[in-house]
Amino acid sequence: MFAVLFGLDIGGTNLKAVKVTPAGEIAESATVPAGGSIPRDALLKRAAETLRSIAGDDRPERVGIAFGGMIQPDGTMRLGSTNLPNLADMPLVEAFSDRLAASCTIDHDARAAMRGEAWLGAAHDAQNAMTVTFGTGIGAGLLLGGRIHGGAHGGAGEIGVWRLIPPPDTDPWPTVEDIAAPAQFAARRGTAFSEAFHAWIDRDSATGSDDELDEAFELVGRMIANAHLLLDLEVIVLIGAVTALGEPFRRAIETSFLAACPAGFPRDLTIRLGTLGPLAGAVGAAALHRDEALS
């Protein structure tokens, strides 16, 4: 059995924090503005303040932290591979352990979200699963054989940068997330993704169609189909703010997957919406120390 667990998820915009009981219940949580645009010292201070605010009478001795970026073998993140440029090249474990006065363990936010959904969320009954996060980019976390899979260099799950269309003659070769990530779609179109999506769902009664959204969902379906054909998964968990669109969004992804996956191969793959919402990464970060206690 493990003690009360604490987890932080530090993304490009917000910092999420959770306190999880030994029974696996989220006792306290907090979301505060923080991320890549504030000075480094201010971010460290806000992390410490937020942790204290949810701790209550429990002293955090060990804290798991998820970061929005690829963590290098030396425990740092590089510019260009993180949405936290204020933390680039900083020794993360040392800096946060010192400021939080606790032993810190770190992980990539996509893997943390997979760990959280596998522990307390939509993949709790699976041994082979993948989270797909839709946001500024598209990323994935992998659960294979009941264990979180990071890959040889900690880079497993970078499905958003797959190139699934032929290269253009002159322009840069677009990735899946260039075309289908909600934030990039919205920036390109100048309209909220949710607004375009609702119009796309209602297109039978609307005038015309939306070729951009057709392409985006077709690419996402092909991406998930290829991942499933490679890994033979049981569950896909869709996470990110866009999943507030609910069942219509899930069904659109499922329809695109079934169209792209060869007959006979979908098997019993289930596509679900995440159940932990924006706290998935923080819960997964807390679970880093649970995994240590149970190993």
Image (cartoon, rainbow, N blue to C red):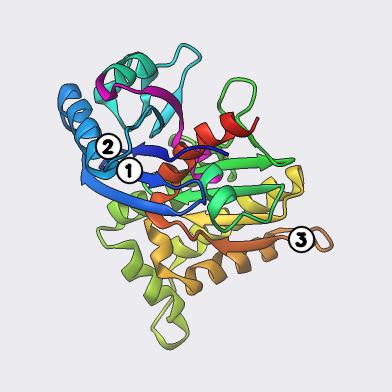
What is the C-alpha distance between the residues marked 1 and 3? 37 Å
Left or right: residue 294 versus residue 19 is: right
104 within the magenta span: yes
Q: Is residue 75 above or below residue 246?
A: above
Which circle, 3 or 2, is nearer the viewer? 2
Q: Which mark identifies residue 94? A: none
Image quarter hosting the C terminus: top right
Residue sitting at x 33%, y 51%: 28
What's the residue type where badge 1 is placed? Ala
Which circle, 1 or 2, is nearer the viewer? 2
Residue sitting at x 27%, y 44%: 54
Q: Position of residue 188 (x, y in %)?
A: 31, 52
- The residue that mark 2 highlights is 51
What is the C-alpha distance between the residues marked 3 and 2? 43 Å
103 within the magenta span: yes
Residue found at the very far right of the displayed protein: 264
Please state the total of marks drawn on the protein image: 3
Q: Are marks 1 and 2 in contact (CB under 8 Å)?
A: yes
Q: Position of residue 190 (x, y in %)?
A: 25, 58
Of mark 1 and mark 3, the one earlier in the sequence is 1
Nearest to the observer: residue 292 or residue 157? 292
Q: Which mark identifies residue 17? A: 1
What's the residue type where badge 2 is placed? Leu
Identify the magenta region: 99-114
Q: Are marks 3 and 2 in contact (CB under 8 Å)?
A: no
Nearest to the observer: residue 44 or residue 78? 44
